[in-house]
Image: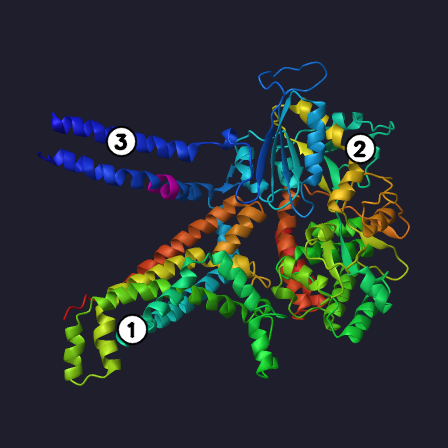
Amino acid sequence: MTFSSKSKYLFLAFCLLPTFLLFIIFTVYPMLGGLYYSFFDWSGTSANKTFIGLDNYIRLWNDSIIKKAIINDFFFVFVKVIGIMTLALFFAVALTQLKIKEAPFYRIVFFFPNIMSVVVIGILWQFIYDPNMGIVNSLLNQVGLTEWARPWLGDKTWVLPSIAIPAIWAGIGLFMLLIMGGISNVPKSLYEAADIDGASEWQQFWHITVPLVWPQIKTSILYIIITSLNGSFVLVQVMTGGGPGSASEVMGSYLYQRAFEDFQFGYGAAIGVLILVVSLITVLVSQFILKKEKVEY
Amino acid sequence: MFVIKERKQTWFLVALMSLMLLLVACSNDEESNSGTEGNGNTEQSTTPSDNTTTENTGDGLSGTLEIQYFVGGYGDGWWKQVIGDFQKQHPDLKIVEHAGPNINTEMNTRWISETPPDVVYIDGAGASETQMIAEGQLMDISEFAKGIKLENGTALLDSFISPAEEVDGGKIYSLPLVFDTWGTWFDAKWFEENGWEVPTDFDSWISSMEKIKADTKIAPFVTTGQHTQYFHRGVLNPAFAAAGGEELLNDLNNGVVEAWKKPETLEVLKKVEKIAKAGVIDSGFAAYNHTQSQMNFLMHKNAYIPVGFWLPNEMKNDTPDSFEFGFTPTPMNDPGKPLALVPDIRTIAIAEKSQNPEAAKAFLEFIFTEEYAQAFAESTGAIMNMKDIDLSSNTNVQDFLKNINEMINNPGAVHTYKRYTPDAELQKIAVEITNEIKLLIIDILLGDITAEEFVDKMVKKAEELRK
C-alpha cells in the first residue's frame, strides 16, 4: 500500500475540512455579517435596512456609556487576571509541591465551579449578596460589623468588585489544572539541586517554577483577557443587568440592550465590532508585554 | 487504481459530511411544529379533519392560520381556550401556535424574511408595535375594524375601555386586547388588620408610608432597581399624567424640551425626592430584579410595590394564603384631584404579509366577546380591554380585579390617560429619553441627585436629541 502526496493531502482535507466549514459558518460568516450590519440603520426585526456609512461608529465615539463600559470591562480584565492567576498559581504549587494528602479532593473542589453554568453561578451569588437574607450581610451583622453590611449589587461603588469575586472564584479551577500540568513536567532533579544549593521554597518558586511554567501562565493570561472581554456580560446580565444605573455596564451588556431591547441592531453590531477590535488590540499588546524567551535548564 | 478509488471515497465522505452540516444548519422548523421546546416555548399545530384541502369548505375557513403569542405573567390558558374554540368552529383550518416567553425573539427571523405568522399578539420583550408599524409589518385593518359588531350590535371600536389607536392619519393597525396597567399593590388584609388607610393622593401616601414604617420598622416602598421601567411606568408616568394630563405625559416621554422645563414636571420630581428623603424606600432596591422585589413584598418586608396587573398571576405560586392583593392607581396626584392611570395596552394585529388574512380577521372578530372577556379575567387575573363587562357576579374572578374593573368603568375617582404610540422618528428619541430616565431614577431614589438636577439632566438630554 503506497501513500502518494495527493492521498496525504486528501486525508488532511478530510480531517480539516469539516472543522473549516464549521468555522466559516459559525465564526467567519457571523463576524462578517456583524461588520456588514454595523454600517446600517437596522432594527433587527424586519427586512428594512438603511445604509448609513460610519454613522454608528461616530455615535459610538460620542456615547458616554461606551466609555464607561470599556473602563468596566478593563476593570474585570485586570482584576480577573491578577485574582485568578495569583490564586491558581498558588493552589497549583500547593497541590503539587506540598504533598497534601487531600490534593485530589481539593482539585475537584476548585474545579467544580468550571462545570457549573455561569447563569447558575450568577443566581447563586445574587443570593449570597442579597441585602436581607444573603450570607455576606448576615455574617457581617453577626460579627458586629453592621455598618459594613450593604446592598452589594445595588451599591454603585461596590457592584463591580462584587461581580468580580464570583468571576474569579469560577475561573480558578481551569487555570490551576493547566499550571499543575506545567509543574508536573518540571524535572524533580531541578528542585533537588536547588535544595542542595540551599535555595528556599520561595526562591525555588520564583526561579524554577515560574520560568518553567511561563508558557502556561502566558496562555492562561491571554485566555482570561479574551474570555473576560467577550464573556463578562453573562454574569453582569444575570446579577445586575448593568446596574445600578450604568455602574456595572460592560460592552457586552450594552450591546445586548441596544440590539435586542432598543431595537438598534445596527448600533449593536457596531458595539460588537468594537469588542472585537478592543479584544484584538488588548491581546496583541498583552502578547508583546508577556513576551519572554522560553527557559530551559 | 487504489489511490483513485480511495480518493473517490474520501471526497464522497467529505461531500456527505458537508451536505449534512448544511442541512442541519439551514433546516427550518416547519417540520417540527409540535411539542414543547427546552426553553419553555411551544409550537403546536392542530391538524384539520381533512388536511389535504386548502380551499373553503362551506362557511368554514381552511388553509393554515399561524398565531404568535407571548406567554408571560398571564399564562397561556386563555389562548388555549379561544384557539381551541375557534378550531372547533373551523375544523378545516390548520392552526399553528407559536407561543412562549421568548417567542418574539424566536420568530424574529420569520419577520425579517417576510414570512411572518398571520396573527400576532404584541407583548413581552422583543416586541414593539411602534417598530412594527414603522417597518410596515402590520396590516391596515381600519375598514375591517370599523365593520366589527359585537353580539349585542354595538360596534367593537366603541366597546373598548382604551380605544384602538389611530396612527398615520386615522389608520388602525391593531386591536387593543389586554387592558394592562401599572399601579401600586398592597396586601389589603394586612392593611385592614393594622388599620392602615389606602392612600388616595400623594400626601396620604407619604403619611401612610411613614405610619407603616413607624408601626413595623420596615421600609414600606420597594421597586426593582434592575428594571427601572417599573418605577418609570408605575410611578412617574401616572404622576406626570396627574400633574399635566396626557399632553405633559406624552411630551415628557417624547423628549419635548419645554415640557421638561415646566414647573409641573419639577413638582413631580420633588415628590419623588420627598419619598427618597423620607427614608421609606428599601435600601436594597437598586440590587433587586423584579422577582426579588416582588418576593420581598409578598413576605411583608415592604408594603407597597409598583407593578402591572400581572403581579398576582405571576406570583401565585409564592403568595402566602393569608395575602390578599390590593391595587390602587399610584397615588402621586395632589389632594382633591383624581388618581391617574396610564394603561399599557397589549394589542393583537394581523401581519401585512399574512398568507391567510381571512382566517386572521375571523380570529380577531371571534375573540372579542363577553364570554372571553370573563374567561380572560378568570384565567389571567387581568382585564380584557372591553367596557361594561360585569365581573361582580363571576365567582371565579378575584376580588381585587372586581374592584379594579369597577374603578376603571367609573371614571369619577380615577382618570385614565393614554400614552400614544410615537411615530418611527419620535420613537428613536423616546428610547433615548427612557434610557436617560432609567439612569436618573436610580440616582434620585438613592438620594444622589435632587429633583432640580434630574430635570436639568433631562433638559440637556432632550436638547441634545432634538438638535
Relative side of A95 to B32, left or right: left
**Mark 1: which amino acid?**
Val
Q: Chain of mark 2?
A: B
Residue A181 appears at what percent x and percent y? 26, 64
At a point 21% along the width and 76% down the height, the residue shown is A207
Q: Residue furthest bottom?
A: A198
Tell me if residue B361 can be seen.
no
Check residue B398 for magenta coloring.
no
- Span highlighted in magenta in the image: A23-28
Pointer 1 with pointer 3, Cβ within 8 A: no
Residue B465 appears at what percent x and percent y? 62, 52
Q: Secondary structure at mark 3?
A: helix
Pointer 2 with pointer 1, Cβ within 8 A: no
At a point 66% along the width and 39% down the height, the residue shown is B122
Q: Secondary structure at mark 1?
A: helix
Residue matched to label 1: A93
Residue matched to label 2: B369
CA distance for labels 2 and 1: 73 Å
**Mark 2: which amino acid?**
Thr
Residue B192 appears at what percent x and percent y? 86, 64
Q: Is residue A254 above or below residue B448?
A: above
CA distance for labels 3 and 2: 60 Å
Residue B398 appears at what percent x and percent y? 81, 49
Question: How packed is label 1: few (under 14 Cα within 10 Å), some, or many (20 or more)?
Answer: many
Residue matched to label 3: B13
Question: How packed is label 3: few (under 14 Cα within 10 Å), some, or many (20 or more)?
Answer: few
CA distance for labels 1 and 3: 47 Å
